[in-house]
Image (tube, grey):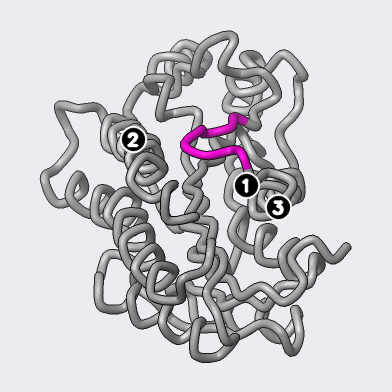
Amino acid sequence: MNELKGKGAVVTGAASGIGRAIATAFIEAGASVLLCDLNAKALDDVTRELGGRAVGRITDVSDEGQVEGALRQARETFGSLDIVVNCAGFGAIRPITELTADKWHSVQAVTLGGVFFGVKHGARIMIEQERPGVIINISSVNARQAGEGQAAYCAAKAGVDMITRCGALELGARGIRVVGIAPGLVETPLTRKELENPAMRDLFLGVIPMNRAVAAEEIGAAAVFLASDKARSINGDTIAIDGGSLTRGYPALLTGIKETAA
């Protein structure tokens, strides 16, 4: 696998879950990767595991200066910045009537703001280099599907999809593609723990026609494809990898759990 041989990449949220799977797939495809995350120990562990073409950097993606600094480090370290994956993000399950302003702002700052900074500064560096590049934004099925208690997360991910489209529109003529991946339920250490609750597991699997979670490695493989020349005409679209859950609806995380417990 040498689809990305010689490419320099940045992946945010790379210490675990989807970000880690993408960083791993990029390394296996021949790229050099700057891994960004706030979890210092997990970041150090995965960086050492991935070997000499992996570099770790503690990065708060809600801070524009830190995002720009990470992207410029990648260019200086690898000789070019060819791929940016904006993966860092989080949500909060709260009814709208109980969602605090602080929680709303923190979700938007990381999940939406981090993507904006990654696209903005990734594109600037790619333009400076006068060479094509690819920016991949990790969205969610929640960009299209409302979820109970997830107003902040759904709004942020919907914004991510629109940043992808606007970025593709503005940057395509400069040779920069901006694309997205919208995962559904992905098997990660975090979701695996949540799905140990039988009621929660039944709610999620009940809306997935394939009746299984997506493996994080599937997201990594899709990211390699989108970053490669094989996808050179894909621009502005966000591809759902969800086992078909968008054909149904999102599980009722608030009322569904209450009904199950009753």
Q: Is residue 9 left or right of residue 32?
A: left
- Location of residue 153 (image quadrant): top left
Residue at the right extreme, as displayed: 1
Is label 3 in contact with label 1 (beta carbons under 8 Å)? no
**What is the magenta segment's predominant secondary structure?**
loop
Q: Residue sitting at 21 percent across and 48 percent down? A: 103
Q: Which mark is residue 229?
A: 3
- Location of residue 165 (image quadrant): top left
Is label 2 in contact with label 1 (beta carbons under 8 Å)? no
Q: Up-down: is 48 above or below 71?
A: below
Residue range corresponding to the magenta coloring: 233-240
Q: Which residue is mark 1?
A: 193
Residue at the left extreme, as displayed: 101
Q: Residue sitting at 32 percent across and 40 percent down? A: 166
Q: Amino acid at mark 1?
A: Lys
As helix, strand or loop, the secondary structure at mark 1 comes to: helix
Other-residue count near label 3 (Cα within 10 Å), few / some / many at <14 / 14–19 / ≥20: few
Q: Which residue is mark 2?
A: 162
Q: Could you tell which of marks 2 and 3 lies nearer the N-terminus?
A: 2
As helix, strand or loop, the secondary structure at mark 3 comes to: helix
Other-residue count near label 2 (Cα within 10 Å), few / some / many at <14 / 14–19 / ≥20: some
Other-residue count near label 1 (Cα within 10 Å), few / some / many at <14 / 14–19 / ≥20: few
Q: Nearer the viewer, mark 3 or mark 1?
A: 3
C-alpha gap between disc 2 and disc 1: 31 Å
Q: Amino acid at mark 2?
A: Met
Q: Could you tell which of marks 2 and 1 lies nearer the N-terminus?
A: 2
Q: Is residue 1 left or right of residue 119?
A: right
